Amino acid sequence: IFMDLFSCYLFEGTAPPGCWYGSNFGHDSVVCECNSTYCDSVGSVTLPPLGQYSSYLSSMAGSRLEPGRGQVQVNSTGAGLRLTVVPYQKYQKIRGFGGAMTDAAAINILSLSAGAQDQLLRQYFSSEGIGYSVVRVPMASCDFSTRLYTYADTPGDYNLDNFTLAPEDVNMKIPLLQRAQALSPRPLSLLASAWSAPAWMKTNDALIGKGSLKGQPGGKEHKTWAQYYIRFLEEYAKYNLTFWALTTGNEPSAGQMTNYSFQALGFTPEEQRDWVALDLGPALHASSYPHTHILILDDNRLLLPHWAKVVLNDIHAGRYIHGVAVHWYMDSLVPAEMSLGVTHHLYPDYYLFGTEACAGWNPLDRGVKLGSWDRAEQYAHDIMEDLNHYVVGWTDWNLALDQTGGPNWVKNFVDSPVIVDTKRDVFYKQPTFYSMAHFSKFLWEGSQRVGVSASRKTDLEYSAFIRPDGSVVLIILNRSSSVILFEVWDPAVGYITSTAPAHSLLTLAWNTH
Ligand SMILES: *[C@@H]1O[C@H](CO)[C@@H](O)[C@H](O)[C@H]1NC(C)=O
Ligand SMILES: *[C@@H]1O[C@H](CO)[C@@H](O)[C@H](O)[C@H]1NC(C)=O
Ligand SMILES: *[C@@H]1O[C@H](CO)[C@@H](O)[C@H](O)[C@H]1NC(C)=O
Ligand SMILES: *[C@@H]1O[C@H](CO)[C@@H](O)[C@H](O)[C@H]1NC(C)=O
Ligand SMILES: *[C@@H]1O[C@H](CO)[C@@H](O)[C@H](O)[C@H]1NC(C)=O
Ligand SMILES: *[C@@H]1O[C@H](CO)[C@@H](O)[C@H](O)[C@H]1NC(C)=O
């Protein structure tokens, strides 16, 4: 099907080489096509000397990280909106950005030829790629698997004698994670999340539906479930893969819903608190991996600040915990300040981290849409809003999906920044891939958000950072605004005059010494 479409392209915008204007797909912007020998790439970014700035632009009209350079001016033009960088207003430090190595992602990546697999992994993880440093790894199966399994499906195996990684881990996810690590210029921050405990540990004797652990925190099911995490860390360590963090479990609210359609494990915040205090915290502390971070919640921010209050107010649980993990679903229902902001101000010692997001999950806007700029804006808006409310990193969902948005055993198909077309041995980089890049490529670990003040009200969205080397990064999203022109003032260097074209994402960066 796509072959035929490619042969009759209608060029409406200026697409970079290898990128195709997506109007033939019924969507509004371009996808960039990569094969085993070709993939457009921004390359490694080095900033010009003091007195000049770099810019990178992506837009609905077809720009994709299009580089530019200019002079920093001594004087203001006095025209239009001014964004002033306020370096002494310091906020959170960035941990990183990334995506998830689900079974589906691994299946899709490995369905390509060796050369195309390598191109794909390089796009995400190498220094010429977009700088991903975080990879979320589901522990055993989730909806983006082709079968239901856990690592300890032998009933009554409280000692986990029969705990064993799955072929999906050993043959697919682990080799790909090792390759990603080998391509990455820095150690990857791996993050583990479990969807369901083995059925025999659960009240409903099933991986799906409404169910929680049998018994009470401190009891044998809760202890075994904590040990399951330790065993997972031990088994992955045998492959030289060590985890930065683990979450207390994916979407605990899902397992509290009647007939939930895929793998879930229900926890109330009270039960999660007591499980961490009595079981997971002590088990991890006594394990070979006591420095692994524990992130609570791993669910939608609409559960904040209540969930955090219940868990973190308890010193017995709180001392084992490092952060609060949030998913992006239904973010539009809850203002960021009321959820993320309030949680940060109540518990400033715990960081906020985005662990899951994807486009195409909403029943009204389902599955893959090749070349959708609207979805790029959804990503950029949410990342910017999170960063402006103390979140230290943002993790996309599946690293790669097929053209139907799967595989997914319950047909819960969604979109991904990379869509694989196995028949043609190519993959498409979606507009969302570039949304991620505008942040992940530039905001290295340790970059600190600083203040920005606008000279007047504007619809532009923006966020500024000072990187560990002292350089400044300012990211600007124009989803729609009546402002024509703006200038940036960094009192340390001077004025930058710029424009943010209609429906665009712009990253500006400059040295300060
Ligand atoms: C890969 O794409 C490039 C650019 O479109 C093309 O020149 C090349 O022939 C393709 N390679 C393969 C193996 O299809
Ligand atoms: C900047 O403005 C000052 C005072 O208005 C003026 O003297 C100077 O020539 C200007 N410099 C440049 C480079 O335009
Ligand atoms: C579980 O492990 C034990 C000891 O290694 C082994 O004898 C037994 O066959 C295993 N059971 C299953 C169901 O795999
Ligand atoms: C293990 O991984 C680290 C990077 O995380 C690497 O530096 C080291 O060489 C690896 N060791 C082995 C034995 O592969
Ligand atoms: C849950 O699923 C069962 C079995 O399919 C069905 O009988 C029951 O009506 C469902 N309950 C709800 C509330 O949907
Ligand atoms: C943002 O886009 C709008 C159109 O959606 C355009 O009119 C405006 O000039 C752009 N803003 C800036 C600052 O360039």
Image (spheres, rainbow, N blue to C red):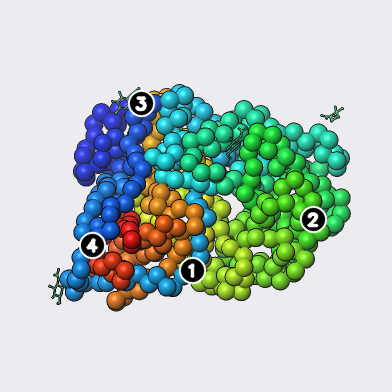
Image point (65%, 33%), residue name: 239
Q: Amino acid at mark 4?
A: Val
Task: Tell me if label 2 and label 1 are in contact, CB under 8 Å.
Answer: no
Residue neighbourhood size for the residue with mark 1, other residues' Cα within 10 Å, grouped as few (<14), some (14–19), many (≥20): some
- Residue 298 at x, y = what percent? 62, 56
Residue 43 picture quarter: top left
The x, y position of residue 3, in whole percent, is: 32, 27
If the image is split into quadrants, where does the N terminus sit?
A: top left
Q: Which mark is residue 37?
A: 3
Locate residue 226, reporting x and y percent: 77, 49
Q: Which residue is mark 4?
A: 72
Circle 2 packing at 10 Å, graded few (<14), some (14-19), many (20+), is: some
- Quadrant of the rendered structure where residue 466 is? bottom left
- Tell me if label 1 and label 4 are in contact, CB under 8 Å: no
Q: Nearer the viewer, mark 2 or mark 4?
A: 4
Instruction: Give me the C-alpha separation between circle 1 and circle 3.
Output: 42 Å
Asked if residue 208 can be seen in this view, the reply is no
Residue at screen point 30% across, 46% down: 64
For residue 90, side relative to residue 477 (left or right): right
Q: Mark 2 sits on what residue? A: 282
Q: Which mark is residue 91?
A: 1
Q: Estimate the spatial distance between the alpha carbons at disc 3 and disc 4, rounded to whole Å.
A: 38 Å
Q: Is residue 122 left or right of residue 107?
A: left
Q: Disc 2 residue type?
A: Pro
Whether the residue carrying mark 3 lies under 8 Å from ligand 1 is answered with yes
Give the label, 3 or 4, closer to the camera: 4
Figure check: 467 above or below 399: below
